[in-house]
Amino acid sequence: MKECTVVGVGGAGLSLARQAHKVIGGRFLAINTDRIGLEDLPPGQGLVIGPEACKCTSAASAARGRKAVEESLEDIRARLPNSGKVVLLAGLGGGAGTGAMPAIASEVVQRGLNLLVAVTLPFRVEADRREVALSGLKELEATGATIIKHDHAEQTTGSMGLEEALAKSGEGLAQRVQLWIKGETDA
């Protein structure tokens, strides 16, 4: 879909966005504080935010993720589309995704674009990360964006390993994003 822009925010968001982009196509953009995670992308598809706040490494906290997005807001605005559908993807509970997503979602909403936010929430055993993630989710909900989420706490992994469980959740989100793109669900 050429009128769709898939944007991954943070490390987990990049992984989720790659999976969604394989399914739906369109324009691809990855936004992260960590330069290393963006090095293998073609020119123009990656944007390092908060080079002063995060020194091009992990944001490590939502507060630093927020500082990073504030520092690089003009660069982000220049990269966001002015038309079409936008899908923002992130894993909540860490730094860049949790801290930056609400501000990026607000920018897209202010442009009047059709926005879907797709996020994952941490496993139940990650109590501190879940608390941060749920706080970030509330901030995202306040933007008025349409949100779909995959809550790892509700996922039964059985004999699945962690990597397989994460890949499965990414696939599931990609399929739900595809349905939204096609207009088959309002999420």
Image (cartoon, rainbow, N blue to C red):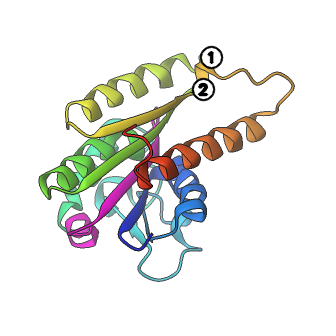
Which residue carries the number 2 mark? 152
Is residue 39 toward the left or the right of residue 168 in the image?
left
State the extent of the magenta-drawn residues as a range: 75-95
Is residue 19 toward the left or the right of residue 13 in the image?
right
Where residue 59 appears, as percent x and y from the top left, is: 41, 47
Query: What is the crowding at mark 1: few (fewer than 14 residues within 10 Å), some, or many (at least 20)?
Result: few
Q: Give amino acid for label 2.
A: His
Which one is earlier in the sequence, the residue at label 2 or at label 1? 1
Residue 148, located in which quarter of the rendered image?
top left
What residue is drawn where x is 18% and y is 50%? 109
In the foreground, 37 or 119 = 119
Q: Classify the position of the N terminus by image quarter.
A: bottom left
Is residue 125 toward the left or the right of residue 8 in the image?
right
Secondary structure under tag 1 reads loop
Q: Given the current orientation, which residue lies at the most extreme right position?
A: 159
Which residue carries the number 1 mark? 125
Report if residue 26 lies within the magenta region: no
Where residue 25 appears, as percent x and y from the top left, is: 52, 68
Residue 186, located in which quarter of the rendered image?
top left
The image shows a total of numbered marks equal to: 2
Where residue 150 appears, as percent x and y from the top left, is: 53, 31
In the foreground, 72 or 172 = 172
Report if residue 85 lies within the magenta region: yes
Secondary structure under tag 2 reads helix
